[in-house]
Image (tube, coloured by chain):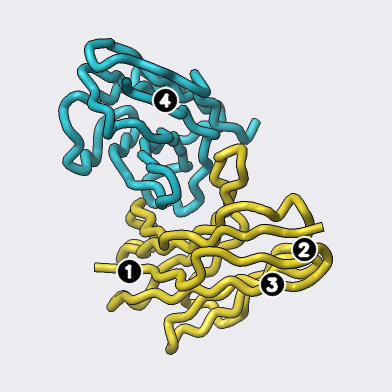
Chain colours: A yellow, B cyan
Amino acid sequence: AQTVTQSQPEMSVQEAETVTLSCTYDTSESNYYLFWYKQPPSRQMILVIRQEAYKQQNATENRFSVNFQKAAKSFSLKISDSQLGDTAMYFCAFMIVEGGGGSNYKLTFGKGTLLTVNP
Amino acid sequence: DTEVTQTPKHLVMGMTNKKSLKCEQHMGHRAMYWYKQKAKKPPELMFVYSYEKLSINESVPSRFSPECPNSSLLNLHLHALQPEDSALYLCASSLGLSNEKLFFGSGTQLSVL
């Protein structure tokens, strides 16, 4: 079974500063996807960034980037130039890639990190 | 259109009521999902539909009854719920079961009295 651990229940950061959210996972699978989802007060789960395990290059999406360490099973999210709109619950998640190359549909989530960006 | 629309946004019901949650997408996605999320917890998968057929039921009690009448629409029928069923119910869709990109709706916040 897969597990995802987010060790920081809550974090805060000043506007315009940089913050890093931690995530570790455990799996015996060799090919999988890792995700960071954001859930603001509007409650919609929004995909922030996605990493394919076979890719060594870290994914980036504008102000969001990840540090993917496959051997250490670590997948942290760095938010640069934090904005008030980044205030949200952030979930790290994992999905297996099946032998045929497709995913197996099931997202395993961590417990989340509540990030507050202060003005 | 990259939206998953859920209605209603809020629902209050008694334990003897029958109600339904609705989820709609017009992205041509053929996999649709129901998740349940309790406060300050991650979402938990309930049901998965693929090509309008129920593929996965994660041992959900029969008082929750899903329905997928067509490729754009997913319903969750509720009957004889318990107060502990109060939660946020999230719908999601993806291109297919093997596609890893899920699009989520904003959810229905359900309170059972």
Q: Residue furthest top?
A: B17
**Left or right: residue B100 compared with residue A79:** left
Q: CA distance from mark 1 to mark 4?
A: 32 Å
Residue at which label 4 appears: B71
Q: Which residue is mark 1?
A: A3
Q: Kindly identify the residue that appears in the image at 69 percent across and 72 percent down.
A: A19
Residue A19, labelled with which disc? 3
Does B8 sit left or right of A14 as displayed? left
Q: Earlier in the sequence, mark 2 or mark 3?
A: 3
Instruction: Identify the residue at horizontal 66%, vertical 65% (top origin).
Output: A12
User: Which circle, 2 or 1, is nearer the viewer?
Assistant: 2
Q: Which of pointers 2 and 4 indicates the residue nearer the eye?
A: 2
Q: CA distance from mark 3 to mark 1?
A: 24 Å
Q: Amino acid at mark 1?
A: Thr
Percent of width and height locating residue A70: 46, 83
**CB under 8 Å between discs 2 and 3:** yes
Mark 2: amino acid: Ser
Residue beneath label 2, please? A82
Q: Residues within 10 Å of mark 4 (few under 14, many from 20)?
A: many
